[in-house]
Image: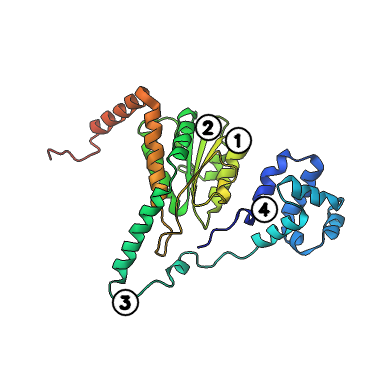
Amino acid sequence: MPERPLKSSPLNQLCSALPSLPMRLQQVGRFVAANDYDATTRSMRELASVAGADPASFTRLAKAIGYSGWDELRAALTEARRPEPAAPFSGRARDRRRGRHAEVALIADKLEAEAAGLSRISPGAVAAAARTLRSARRIWIAGFRSCRGVAELLNYELRLFRPGDVQFVGGAWPEDLDFGAFRSGEAVVVIGFAPYSRASVLSARAAHRAKASLIAIADSVSAPMAEGADHALLFEAAASPGFFPSLTGALAIAHSLAAATFVLGGAAAKKRLEATEARLAATAQYVSEKG
């Protein structure tokens, strides 16, 4: 599935920028956000008349959020309203070779693509994100729909040596209740790939509002939940053949993040891990090798 470019989410950019804009531009920005269809179909002069604003303020708004002018922002709004593909997964199954042993060829191609994708993960970027996790007072992990498994894995591994300060977003109640608990000095890890879940984008926005550190594990730097991230850890998703995007890279990043965070924790992390292992042994959580 083709990646959607950064400007396919101009409303995300606009909403993120609103608090830092002058009051008058905030008013114009809120009007555009609430009337994005009109913004794509009516002239700037007509919009200004309805909004009770100076037409030039629309140009100033566009430039304030990184566009060359109103025409470019309007074009981005128009593109963002383009309907999403109705079949993001089944569409990937087309044009595959058929015939005898087609499934073997598919698996071979997939394994080759997975290996190539893993080689493109940046160790330095993962290490930098691990340093942020190490210093965070609390770690929140958000993964939804098919990314939930990756989030649960990272949550489990981190809790082995940080049992009291790692939480799964939406684990015990609706995720929007957790959004209000994000704080500055904490870290929020959000995992996602195209098509992006709405909850992942809302998690990232909540992290921004709280001034928490945002770590995005995503398939593209232009992913809406990666906008403004302190650390963008990229994995290959769409390059792998098969009907469903690959999560192999995301899993590798999650494993690496946990391992690096543990190493950075030093003796204290090792002591907490040993305590966790002792508790697991005492409650007989694993099959005895002698049995």
Tell me whether the residue at label 3 lies in contact with that at label 4, contact meaning CB atoms closer than 8 angstroms.
Answer: no
Q: Mark 3 and mark 2: span between their CA atoms?
A: 53 Å
Q: Residue 224 in the image: x percent, y percent?
A: 58, 50
Q: Which residue is mark 4?
A: 10
Give the mark nearest the N terminus, 1 or 4: 4
Tell me whether the residue at label 1 lies in contact with that at label 4, contact meaning CB atoms closer than 8 angstroms.
Answer: no
Element under label 3? loop
Give the mark nearest the N terminus, 2 or 1: 2
Inspect the image, locate mark 3, and give the three-letter code of the amino acid beneath it. Answer: Gly
Q: Relative to 35, does residue 137 appear above or below in the rendering?
A: above
Residue 103 placement, left or right of 173: left
Residue occupying image coordinates x 47% and y 33%: 133
Label 2, residues with CA under 10 Å away: few <14, some 14-19, many ≥20: many
Q: Nearer the viewer, mark 2 or mark 4?
A: 4
Inspect the image, locate mark 2, and give the three-letter code of the amino acid beneath it. Answer: Glu
Per the rendering, the mark at residue 186 is 2
Element under label 2? loop
Q: Which residue is mark 3?
A: 99
Q: Nearer the viewer, mark 3 or mark 4?
A: 3
Per the rendering, the mark at residue 210 is 1
- The quadrant of the image that shows the C terminus is top left
Considering every residue shown, the one lying at the far top of the view is 267
Q: Nearer the viewer, mark 1 or mark 3?
A: 3
Q: Nearer the viewer, mark 3 or mark 2?
A: 3
Q: Mark 1 and mark 3: span between their CA atoms?
A: 54 Å
Q: Mark 1 and mark 4: span between their CA atoms?
A: 21 Å
Q: Relative to 141, does residue 4 appear above or below in the rendering?
A: below
Residue occupying image coordinates x 60% and y 35%: 210
Give the mark nearest the N terminus, 3 or 2: 3
Label 1, residues with CA under 10 Å away: few <14, some 14-19, many ≥20: some
Inspect the image, locate mark 1, and give the three-letter code of the amino acid beneath it. Answer: Ala
